[in-house]
Image (spheres, coloured by chain):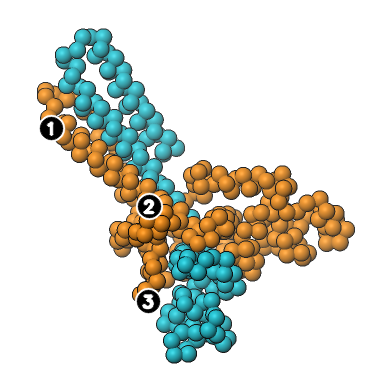
């Protein structure tokens, strides 16, 4: 039970007496009723209570935070929820990895190009083959990202 | 219909989610198909004798008759009991049914799939659930961005110090700017710790503040809820 005996947000929403042992009270104060309402709407009070009790007390605050985040995402996007964010982040990772591969190819060219003037023709041809191979790998990676 | 439902600008395809994230789930589904989890031959006999053959995973789990208009049946077949078990454990049967009923028929399959994934990740990680994956992806993005910045700095140095005409590779095609990272509103003003990645928590470090969301992209702005 929070502070001066006022019920926590969960007990207020559920219209029940908030006891000192209330599992929700430390994480859903009465000042922010919307937070518990969101979680209750998506997961249900009984499920949240069970999930909190299955988690060590030291981690319950983080668990509540993540549940609120997931519930908020699901309320905002009932179809995809948090999965939309994951997909977006994965796209970013793929794009950045593609840029990194191209940057590596470019730096390899920049390093080896000035050295070709002082090398015999055979070595220059080998270096050019290596550069083309790196560029092909980079572009294949670029193409695969967009298919 | 959900009032105020906004179709996202980016339509993610859950099927293209990284295989690494779904390996465990695929293995579980394979186990379900092989009949290792739940169901069992005994229940099939019970279905045939008393409750009718062909109950969906939800009705089988709830031990009730599966009617022809069961809202969960199309998305939770009896061949995948573990999938529904996770959803039931995290969301609950009534919440799942209510959510699916509030959506157009065309969207229900996607919604069921995403709920199953979120439930699975929550079962795997009871503390962080899917937000742990988001944190790991954000970390990966930061690492790759750092590496990219270092490489581009090296290119600048090498190109500037190179002699003669250097035949530069064509500039990489600029991809569209990535959407802003989700900003988890996880901390409470009352002093509860902000959400940290589990390994960061072990190092007793807080997750760095992500970049501010793009105000033009309300899809990822969770502050409006």
> Do discs 3 and 2 share a chain?
yes
The residue lying at 34 percent from left, 22 percent from top is: A133
Which chain hosts label 2?
B
* Residue B217: assigned label: none
Relative to B59, does residue B36 appear above or below in the rendering?
above
Badge 1 crowding class, 10 Å Cα cut-off, few under 14, some 14 to 19, many 20 or more, is: few
Residue at (25% x, 37% y) in the render: B151
Q: Residue at x 42, y 71 (%)?
A: B225
C-alpha distance separating marks 3 and 2: 26 Å
* Mark 1 secondary-structure assignment: helix
Q: How many marks?
A: 3
* Separation (CA) of disc 2 from disc 1: 33 Å
Residue behind mark 1:
B160
Left or right for B38, reference B203: right
Q: Which residue is mark 3?
A: B190
Chain the render paints orange: B
Horizontal relation, residue A67 to residue B140: left or right: right
Q: Which mark is residue B138?
A: 2
Q: Is residue B165 above or below residue A79?
A: above
Query: The residue marked by circle 3 belongs to what chain?
Result: B
Residue B117 at x, y percent in the picture: 55, 54
Q: Colour of chain A?
A: cyan
**The N terminus of chain B is located in which quarter?**
bottom right
């Amino acid at each position: 039970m929070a502070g001066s005996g006022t019920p926590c947000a969960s007990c207020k929403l559920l219209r029940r007496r908030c006891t000192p042992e209330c599992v929700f009270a430390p994480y859903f104060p009465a000042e922010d009723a919307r937070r518990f309402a969101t979680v209750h709407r998506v997961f249900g009070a009984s499920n949240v209570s069970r999930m909190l009790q299955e988690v060590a007390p030291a981690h319950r605050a983080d668990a509540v935070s993540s549940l609120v985040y997931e519930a908020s995402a699901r309320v905002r996007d009932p179809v995809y929820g948090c999965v939309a964010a994951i997909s977006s982040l994965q796209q970013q990772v793929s794009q950045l990895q593609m840029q990194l591969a191209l940057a590596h190819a470019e730096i390899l060219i920049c390093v080896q190009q000035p050295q070709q003037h002082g090398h015999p023709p055979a070595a220059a041809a080998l270096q050019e083959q290596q550069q083309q191979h790196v560029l092909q790998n980079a572009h294949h990676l670029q193409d695969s990202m967009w298919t | 219909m959900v009032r105020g439902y906004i179709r996202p600008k980016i339509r993610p395809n859950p099927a293209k989610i990284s295989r690494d994230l779904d390996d465990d789930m695929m293995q579980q589904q394979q186990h379900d198909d092989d009949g290792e989890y739940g169901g069992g031959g005994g229940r099939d006999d019970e279905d045939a004798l008393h409750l009718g053959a062909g109950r969906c995973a939800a009705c089988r789990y709830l031990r009730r008759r599966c009617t022809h208009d069961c809202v969960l049946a199309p998305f939770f077949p009896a061949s995948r009991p573990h999938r529904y078990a996770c959803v039931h454990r995290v969301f609950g049967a009534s919440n799942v049914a209510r959510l699916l009923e509030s959506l157009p028929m065309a969207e229900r399959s996607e919604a069921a799939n995403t709920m199953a994934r979120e439930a699975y990740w929550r079962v795997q990680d009871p503390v962080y659930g899917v937000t742990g994956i988001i944190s790991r992806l954000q970390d990966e993005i930061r690492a790759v961005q750092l590496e990219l910045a270092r490489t581009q700095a090296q290119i600048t140095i090498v190109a500037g110090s190179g002699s003669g005409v250097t035949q530069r590779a064509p500039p990489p095609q600029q991809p569209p700017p990535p959407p802003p990272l989700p900003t988890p509103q996880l901390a409470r003003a009352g002093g509860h710790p902000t959400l940290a990645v589990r390994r960061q928590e072990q190092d007793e470090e807080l997750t760095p503040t992500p970049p501010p969301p793009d105000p033009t992209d309300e899809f990822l702005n969770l502050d409006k809820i």
